Amino acid sequence: VELVHVRTLKMGDDVTAVCHSHSRDPSKLVVAVATLDATVRVFFHHSLSFFLQLYGHKLPVLCMDISDDNALIATGSADKTVKIWGLDFGDCHRSLLAHSDSVMQLRFVPQTHYFF
């Protein structure tokens, strides 16, 4: 396996997490980038052009995952919450007080909208 650097995406703040979607349709592939300002910015994979900004966490997002159908993104934060967002309009579907400490990792179960 060989990795080749092709493009660079400049961010205005330090990056805390990165996630790439799993869609089989190349036009639906996105890259989500969380930064220290507690927001997540979503970019189209093919052009790295801006698509959505997700804001609502009080502290930085530390982990995230995108569902296999590209419908949802789940974010876990240092504010001890997990938020579930729609990737169509960037709306927050649900906010869960998830933990007694920072949420460090989460993943969707393949082919479902369940996560752990």
Image: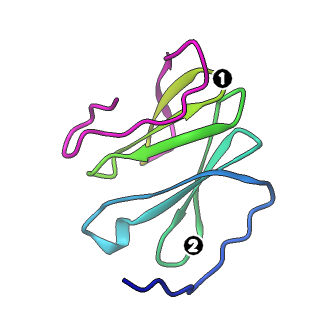
Q: On the rendered structure, is 8 left or right of 82?
A: right
Q: Establish if 69 lies above or below 99.
A: below
SS of the residue at dot 1?
Answer: loop
Residue 113 point in image, percent of width and height: 27, 35
Sequence-first tag of 2 and 1: 2
Does the residue at mark 2 contact the one at mark 1 (Cβ under 8 Å)? no
Magenta range is 88-116
Q: On the rendered structure, is 76 left or right of 34?
A: left
Q: How crowded is mark 1: few (under 14 residues within 10 Å), some or many (20 or more)?
A: many
Type of the residue with mark 1: Asp
Q: Which mark is residue 79?
A: 1
Q: The C terminus is located in which quarter?
A: top left
Residue furthest to the right in view is 12
- Give whichever of 26, 19 is nearer the camera: 19
Secondary structure that dominates the magenta span = loop
Task: Tell me, yes or no, whether the highlighted magenta stretch contains residue 103.
Answer: yes
SS of the residue at dot 2?
Answer: loop
Q: Which mark is residue 48?
A: 2
